[in-house]
């Protein structure tokens, strides 16, 4: 008898139910929109200096229907969004694992539309269309995750298509300073820094009908450009906390001097390579300085760009490969984060391949390069902790109705994996044209 190997699915015990991603999103309840959210926003922004530059057209557009696109850096983005909307109800797209932070039924009552990050499925599009058809508004964070480096992440090519489908005016809220307040790689105590947002109407309904999908994508992308470190320099913002570099090795994982990818560590304001001894300081203005040699990179994003180039070169030479057997969790429902036996994960030029066994069945999950334009990376993931009590650093891959989460032994591999996923997508997209 041929052995059964499950393809991109797990079979759970009968007591475990998968979350219904296709259920119609609820209209935001009045008590939440009019009372609970304003209370949360008032508390969330009470100690955070914040200003806005708002396009006058926004006030007229928000009287009718609209699609709101927002860049994503941390939870502060929601506070500012709701402040700008001023009690206007909206159904936001929200990643399903956020449903564990608050009770999932409360997220549903607030009108949230669930999404599994970077999965190819049509349920969220159908849900957004359902909201629009009944006269509602939709909020989307098209980068689909918190920015890891304080700069615009990849926006999907499908953006223009669903803007055409919804056919309602498009508002962009571009936040500045949120990454500096609490960078994703840091997740320490928040810094009290000024933040600012720009709100502008980027597409009217007439323009959506007249423009092509590519032209719409270009319009949105041109309005979505931001760089937190440049913004810091331009606004002369100083970050004086002594812990400001802690965690920075999660993205600056490769030493530019000895090229080792596992030897960088951080303490207070410093990055140190244990292999060659190079020491860099993250200065108060966000720049970098070497304390014992040549400063290879004076900007965080220049270091990141160099890392991307090295990954691109590995892909070009055919040498890129990540392989590890690691702790694994399945996530069929917000009530069920399930520890499963360790799975073997391979990421190479062919994409992802995951092999494991759960509930008596062998399974194989695969994702080709063109099935993921990016990958979910979570630093300090609130749903899982290390033995010392600190939050885990994980990555995840998803199908339309399930997800697998992995905890690698060295969290510095996460950023390299995300770079490789994006570069493999870009390279294979170009080949397919």
Image (cartoon, rainbow, N blue to C red):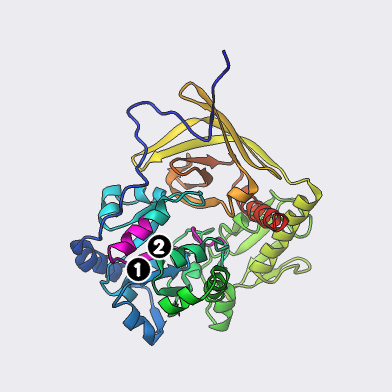
The quarter of the rendered structure image containing the C terminus is bottom right
Q: Secondary structure at mark 2?
A: loop
Q: Which residues are magenta?
A: 127-148
Label 2 sits on residue: 75
Residue assigned mark 1: 79
Please, is residue 298 above or below residue 321 in the view? below
The answer to whether the residue labelled 1 contacts the one labelled 2, judged by CB atoms less than 8 Å apart, is yes
**Badge 1 element:** helix
Q: Residue furthest front?
A: 210
| Residue 46 seen from this side | no
Q: Give the residue drawn at x 62%, y 58%.
A: 251
Separation (CA) of disc 1 from disc 2? 7 Å
Residue in the picture at 75% in, 60% down? 256
Q: Please give the name of the residue rendered at 71% of the width and 43% of the height, measured from the top-left corner.
A: 321
Does the magenta portion include 17?
no
- Which quadrant does the N terminus fall into? top right
Image coordinates of residue 422 in percent, x first then y, are 63, 55
Residue 113: image quadrant is bottom left
């Amino acid at each position: 008898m041929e052995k059964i190997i499950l393809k991109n699915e797990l079979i759970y015990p009968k007591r475990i139910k998968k979350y219904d991603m296709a259920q119609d999103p609820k209209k935001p309840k009045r008590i939440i929109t009019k009372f609970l959210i304003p209370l949360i926003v008032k508390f969330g922004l009470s100690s955070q200096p914040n200003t806005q530059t708002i396009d006058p057209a926004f006030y007229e557009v928000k009287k009718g229907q609209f699609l709101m696109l927002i860049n994503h850096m941390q939870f502060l983005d929601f506070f500012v969004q709701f402040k700008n909307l001023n009690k206007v109800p909206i159904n936001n797209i929200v990643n399903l694992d956020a449903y564990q932070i608050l009770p999932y039924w409360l997220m549903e009552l607030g009108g949230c539309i669930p999404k599994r990050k970077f999965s190819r499925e049509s349920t969220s599009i159908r849900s957004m269309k359902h909201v629009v058809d009944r006269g509602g508004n939709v909020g989307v964070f098209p980068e689909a995750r918190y920015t890891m480096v304080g700069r615009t992440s990849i926006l999907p090519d499908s953006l223009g298509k669903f803007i055409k489908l919804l056919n309602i005016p498009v508002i962009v809220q571009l936040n500045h300073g949120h990454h500096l307040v609490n960078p994703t790689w840091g997740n320490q105590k928040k810094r009290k820094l000024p933040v600012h947002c720009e709100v502008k109407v980027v597409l009217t309904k007439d323009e959506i009908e007249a423009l092509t999908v590519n032209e719409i994508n270009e319009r949105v992308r041109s309005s979505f450009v931001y760089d937190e470190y440049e913004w810091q320099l331009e606004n002369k913002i100083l970050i004086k906390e002594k812990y400001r570099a802690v965690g920075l090795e999660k993205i600056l994982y490769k030493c530019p001097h000895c090229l080792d990818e596992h030897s960088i560590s951080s303490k207070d304001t410093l990055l140190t390579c244990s292999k060659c001894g190079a020491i860099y300081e993250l200065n108060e203005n966000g720049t970098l300085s070497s304390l014992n040699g040549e400063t290879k990179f004076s900007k965080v994003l220049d270091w990141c760009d160099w890392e991307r180039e090295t990954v691109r070169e590995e892909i070009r030479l055919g040498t890129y490969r990540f392989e590890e057997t690691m702790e694994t969790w399945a996530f069929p429902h917000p009530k069920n984060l399930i520890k499963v036996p360790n799975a073997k994960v391979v990421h190479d030029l062919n994409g992802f391949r995951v092999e494991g066994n759960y509930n008596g069945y062998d399974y194989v999950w695969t994702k080709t390069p063109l099935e993921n334009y990016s990958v979910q990376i979570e630093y300090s993931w609130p749903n899982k902790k290390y033995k010392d009590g600190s939050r885990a650093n994980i990555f995840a891959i998803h199908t339309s109705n399930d997800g697998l989460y992995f905890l690698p032994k060295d969290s510095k591999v996460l950023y390299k994996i995300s770079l490789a996923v994006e570069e493999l997508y870009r390279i294979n997209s170009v080949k397919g044209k």
